[in-house]
Every structure is written in C-alpha cells, then in structure tokens.
Amino acid sequence: MTLEERGIPSAGVATEVFVEAAAAQSQSLGADPAYVFVAHPVQDRTDAELRALADGALDAILEKLQAQPNR
C-alpha cells in the first residue's frame, strides 16, 4: 500500500491458499491491492521449479502493474 500511495505500481504475489486471507486483509485496510496467486506450496520446490512458477506468473504480474495508473 505504501508503494501505491507513492504512485509506484505494485502487485502482491502469494500462494493460492492465501486468497481468503488477502481479501480479508484488504477489506480491513480499506484497500484494493493487485494480487497474483501462484500454486502452493513453494517451500519444498527446487530452484528450477520456483523459476518455472515465477516465469508462469510473470505475465499476470506485469499485467497488474501496467493496469495501474500513475499517481
């Protein structure tokens, strides 16, 4: 939220099990941040698997960042 308040586009990235928690946090803060959710879990993945996960999310992250107006 601090970055967005400064006019810097941002997007949160979390695993899919945090969808409801992110929505609850957003509501409690009165914010509507951009999120991209990836497959869970991440802690046991190999470096190659994490790179593939990040590569798979990159387009969605860039889309969220580009959709935000500069303030």
Image (cartoon, rainbow, N blue to C red):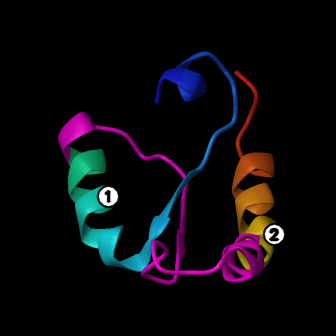
What x and y, as percent, mark residue 58?
A: 78, 66
Q: Secondary structure at mark 2?
A: helix
What residue lies at 71% left-to-right and 60% top-to-bottom? Answer: 61
What x and y, as percent, mark residue 59?
A: 81, 69
**Outermost residue toward the top in this view:** 6
Is residue 45 part of the magenta span, yes or no? yes
Q: CA distance from mark 2 to mark 1?
A: 21 Å
Is residue 7 part of the magenta span, yes or no? no
Residue picked out by circle 1: 22
Amino acid residing under circle 2: Asp
Residue picked out by circle 2: 59
Please state if 25 lies on the left or on the right of 58 as rendered: left
Please state if 61 lies on the left or on the right of 6 as rendered: right
- The answer to the question of whether label 2 and label 1 lie on touching residues, with beta carbons closer than 8 A, is no
Amino acid residing under circle 1: Ala
Relative height, residue 56 to residue 23 (above, below): below
Question: Residue 16's image quarter?
Answer: bottom left
What residue lies at 24% left-to-right and 62% top-to-bottom? Answer: 21
Please state if 32 lies on the left or on the right of 19 as rendered: right
What x and y, as percent, mark residue 29?
A: 25, 36
Q: Which residues are magenta?
A: 28-54
Q: Secondary structure at mark 1?
A: helix
Q: Earlier in the sequence, mark 2 or mark 1?
A: 1
Which disc, if any, is residue 63?
A: none
Give the total number of marks visible in the rendering.
2
* Disc 1 residue crowd, few under 14, some 14–19, many 20+, Cα 10 Å: some
Please state if 52 lies on the left or on the right of 17 as rendered: right
Which quadrant does the C terminus fall into? top right
Relative height, residue 1 to residue 62 (above, below): above
